[in-house]
Image: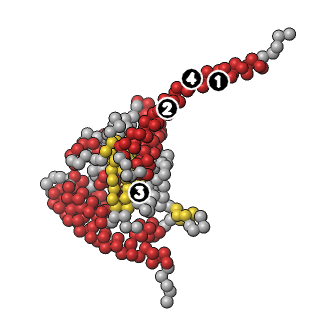
Amino acid sequence: MRSIPEEILRFLPGAAVHIVAALVGLVPLSAGYSVAKLWSLGGWRLADSPSFKAGCFGFIYANGIFPSVFCDYGNNNFGPLPANEADQQAMLRSTPIIVANHVSYLDVMVLPLALQMPKFMSKAGVRNAPLFGTLGDDLEYIWVDRGSKDARGAALGAIHEHVAGWKDGDRPLLIFPEGTTSNGTSLLEFKQSAFVSGAPVRPVLLKHTGAWNPACTDYLMTDDGQRSLYSDGEWAMNFWAHLLHSCTIFICEPYYPSAEEKANPKLYASNVRAYMLEKQRELELVCRDRRSNPGGLVRDWRRHLRLQRLAAEALEPRSRLRMRLQKRGREGTQSPKAG
């Protein structure tokens, strides 16, 4: 009789706990969804149903997924999301588009709940899938046939239509401008689709902070230091082997494009990426020292950077003067002597 491989035995206890927890989590999710469907008969949207959101939170908590949210309110004012749901919606529904980094499959469960249920753009094929298709219709997903020849044009058209019909307070559209998952340590180059309309965007950054980081789902380092394909099965084994999956979400201030950026989507995308890279360094700082007040950490970091810039600006005139003197000195030594 063949023995069970050691790596399988190692994740079986965690897998058993996760399976039981997922089944338990389906109870509040099913109950919340059922109540929300009845609620929707009165004309209310499923995405705004407190019972549905409570059921979703029950499901991710049962699976050990615990997000914490950190907001930048401007003027060095940092803190958690407002406790009142109406205040949360007023803040998170102030731009037609939200752009976020994309590091794992867990993002599509965590970010909608943290961001008050924005709209998603999804493959049209998902609409025919059991449960997910119905849920996507209920949540007003924007369906795009990515297999068609004009998939990019259809996606751009859907974004333009969303922006044109959007009003302040409506649900925004969540877009991953990288276009795929990255390893979470930086940002891939942004695609321009989220920026072609020239509409304001709200950047959001997510970092997984648990014992196992689900980012970088394509490759896995082997024991001999080589990279091998990180299959879905291996990803599931690592997820099941760890019971807690914490993550931190940093909601940035809205980014309002200049006239030049509106006219140049490539420049707009590049500048938003540069802005998000700065914020990602702040998020890394917060995640490294979770015992401290995150607002104080970021304020101190920004003060440090500001002093560095001021020092560099103060030294710049001296550097230019030194360079001019050095240039004159070189020119003097190189000039021909008078005969």
- Mark 1 lies on residue: 323
- Amino acid carrying label 4: it is Pro
Q: Which amino acid lies under the numbered mark 2 shown in the image of this protein?
A: Arg
Say which residue appears at 28% left-offset and 52% top-offset: 117
Name the residue rendered at 30%, 47% in the picture: 80
Circle 4 is placed at which residue position? 317
Mark 2 Cα within 10 Å, few/some/many (few <14, many 20+)? few
Quadrant (top left, top right, bottom left, bottom right) of the C terminus: top right
Pick the front one: 273 or 281: 281
Disc 3 residue crowd, few under 14, some 14–19, many 20+, Cα 10 Å: some
Q: SS class of the residue under badge 3?
A: loop
Location of residue 234 with respect to 303 vertically, above or below: below
Residue that label 3 marks: 209
What's the distance in space between the residues labelled 2 and 4, CA to CA? 13 Å
> Which one is earlier in the sequence, the residue at label 1 or at label 2?
2
> What distance separates the C-alpha of mark 1 from that of mark 3?
47 Å
Pick whichever, 313 or 172, lies toward us.
313
CB under 8 Å between discs 1 and 3: no
